[in-house]
Image (cartoon, rainbow, N blue to C red):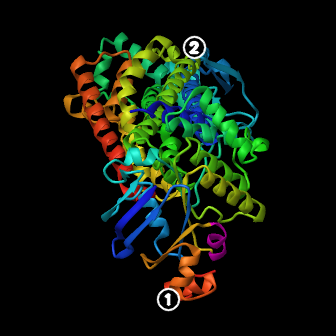
Amino acid sequence: MIRVQDVYKSFGEVKAVQGVSFEAPDGRITGLLGPNGAGKSTTLRMLYTVLRPDTGSATIDGHDVVNSPLQARRAIGPLPHGSGIYPRLTARENIRYYGKLNGMSGKSLEQRIDQLSDMLEMEEFMDRRTKGFSQGQRTKVALARAIVHEPRNVILDEPTNGLDVMATRALRDLIRKLRDHGKCVLFSSHVMQEVAALCDRIVIIARGRVVAQGSPDALRSQTGKDNLEDAFVAAIGSEEGLE
Amino acid sequence: MSGLWTVFSKEVKDNLRDRRTVLSSLGMALLSPVLFMWLMSFVLEQAISDLEESVDLAVVGADNAPNLMAFLESNNVSPGEGPEDPEQAVKDRDHDVVLIIPDEYGERFESGTPATLRLVYDSSRAKDSEKDYRRVRGLIRGYSQQVGNLRLQVRGINPAITRPIQVDSTNVASPSARAVSLLGVIPYFVIFSVFMGGFYLAIDTTAGEREQGSLEPLLAQPVARATLALGKLLATAVFSAATLVLVLVAFSYAIEFVPLEQIGMSVEFGLDKVGTLFLGVLPLVLLAASFMMIIASFTKSFKEAQTYLTFVILVPTMPLLIVAFLAPQPQMSNMAIPSFSQALIINEIIKGESIAPELIGVSVISTLVIGLICSLVAIRLYQREGMLG
C-alpha cells in the first residue's frame, strides 16, 4: 500500500512536482500516466527515497519515506527508469547481490533466484556476464533483482521502454501475476494503450499535478468521453507529449 | 553497518574482472621497476666503462720515446703501429687519435728544450675521437709535469713554486652521482602506484556506476548510503594497498639486478625492508582512495572522471620529484605533508638511514587525520541528492 499526500519537489527554478496525492492499494495495478516531463519519475524517485520531497509526505506500508527510509526501502522493489545492471557480473550474481543487500543469504536466497529464473525464463543466460545482453534480457535481470526479496510493493518506472512485443507481453504477464499475489504494483508510463491494457487504477499527472484519477470506467464518465484516449487528452488539457 | 561486507566484496570481485583496473595495478607494479632497472643499469654501465675503458692509440715514431710509451701503457693506453698519413687516417675513421712523435724528440727532451708532440683527432666525433684525445692529452700533460717536477727537484727547487694557483674541481654530475639521484625516483614510482591502484575503482564506484544507471536502484536498497560509500571506499583502498605491495616487492627484486656495488653504493631494499616500507606508506592509502573518490563524485561520466583524476593526481605526486633532485632532509614541517613525507620515509629507508620516531609519528598522524577527513567528505558527498546527477 502506497500513499502519497500533497508532495512538492523543485530543482532550483524547475517545479517538477507541485502537490501530488494518490493511493496505490494492495492487490491492484496502479498506473501513473502522463506526458514526458510531467513529474512521474520525480514522484517515483521520492517513493524509493533517492529524492526527498520538499513538502508533503509519502508512506509505504505505513513507513514514512523521509523519517524511516530504510524500512520504506525494505518494503519496496524498485525498478528505476533505465535501471542499469553490472556488466562484469553474471545475471545470477547481479540478482544475488541485491538479495544480500536485502539481508537474504544461503540456500533460501539461491532457491529464490532459481524460482525467479524459472518465472522470467532466464535459465539460458543466468550464468553469463551481462555485458552484451539485449534490452529485454537486461530488463529481466533488473526486474528479478528488484523483486528478489519478495517486496509487498513494486514500483516500476517506464518498465516497457525499449522492449520488443514479446518482452512487453512477458512483462505484462508478470505484473498481473504480482497483482494476483496481492502485491501493490505502481508503474509509470507515457503510453496510453499500455496503461489501458493493464491498470485497475489510473492516476493522470500533468505539469506536476494530478489532474484525474480512478478506474478506467470512472475516468471515462468523469470526462464525459467514451474513448480513454480522449478522456486522457481532456484531462491533461492538451495533446502535448502524447504518443 | 549491515551490508558493508556485501558491498565491499562485490566491488572487489567486480573490479578484479575489469581489465583496466587489473592492468593499471599490475602494469604499474611490473613496468616501473623494469623501467627503473633499465635506466639505472644504463647509467651505471656508462659510469663504470668511463673509468676503465682502455684506449687504443696509434703512434707514429713510438721508438723515439720509449719512456713515454711505458707511462701510457701503465695508464691503460695501448700504443699501436701508426698510419702512413695520420690526418687522412683520422678523417677516414681508420683511427680515433694518432700521436706523432718527431725524430728530434729525444734530442730536445735531453737538452731541456720543450719537445713537441702532435695529436691528430676529429672534434666532430665527440663520442670516440674527442674523448680519447682528452684522455691521451691529459696523460701526456701529467707525464710532462712529472718530468718537469723531477728536473726542478734535481736543481733543488720546490716544484710547487711553479703553481701559484691550484684549482680543484668537483663535478657533481659525475655518472655515479647521476645514479644516486636516480634512486630518488623510487619514492615517486611507489607513491604514484598507490594512486594508480585505486584509480579505476574510485571512478567505477561513483561516476561509472552513475553512468551505467546502476546507482539509482542501488541507492534504493535498504542499506544506509554511508555504508555503501564506505564499502566502496574500502574496496578502493584495498586495491591501492595491494598495488603498493606488488610495486615494493617488484622493486626489491629489480634492484638486485642493478650493479650498485660497483660504484661503491649499497641500497637497503631487501624483502625484509618491504614490510617496513609498506607500513610507512600505508597511511597514505586511505587518503589516496578518498581523495580520488571525492573528485570522481563531482564528475558526470567515466571519461570526465578519468580526465580530471589524471590531472588531479599530479598534485600529490609532482612534488615528489623535488625529493628526487633536491633530497631534502625530513623535518617536522615537511613530514606533516602527506605523500611528500611518505616519499621522504622511503628515501631514508632505502638509503639505510634512520629517521626519528617522532618524525614518522608526525607523518602517520597527519596523513591519517587528513585521510579520515577526506573519507568523511567522500561519504557525505555520497549522501547528497546530486549524486544521481
The reply to whether residue A35 is in sight is no
Mark 1 neighbour class, 10 Å CA radius: few under 14, some 14 to 19, many 20 or more: few
Where residue B43 appears, as percent x and y from the top left, is: 54, 29
Q: Quadrant of the C terminus of chain B?
A: bottom left
Where residue B274 appears, as percent x and y from the top left, is: 46, 17
* Residue named by callout 2: B67
In reply to whether residue A196 is colored magenta, the answer given is yes
Q: Nearer the viewer, residue B195 or A208?
A: A208
Q: Which residues are magenta?
A: A192-198
The subunit carrying tag 2 is B
In the figure, is residue B135 to the left or right of A64? right
In reply to whether residue A90 is colored magenta, the answer given is no
Q: Classify residue B17 by image quadrant.
A: top right
The reply to whether residue B236 is in sight is yes
Residue found at x 52% / y 27%: B247
- Determine which of the numbered discs, if any, sits on residue B140 in the image: none
The subunit carrying tag 1 is A
Query: How would you classify the magenta stretch by its main secondary structure?
Result: helix
Q: Classify residue A168 by image quadrant.
A: bottom right
In the figure, is residue B242 to the left or right of B317? right
* Residue named by callout 1: A237
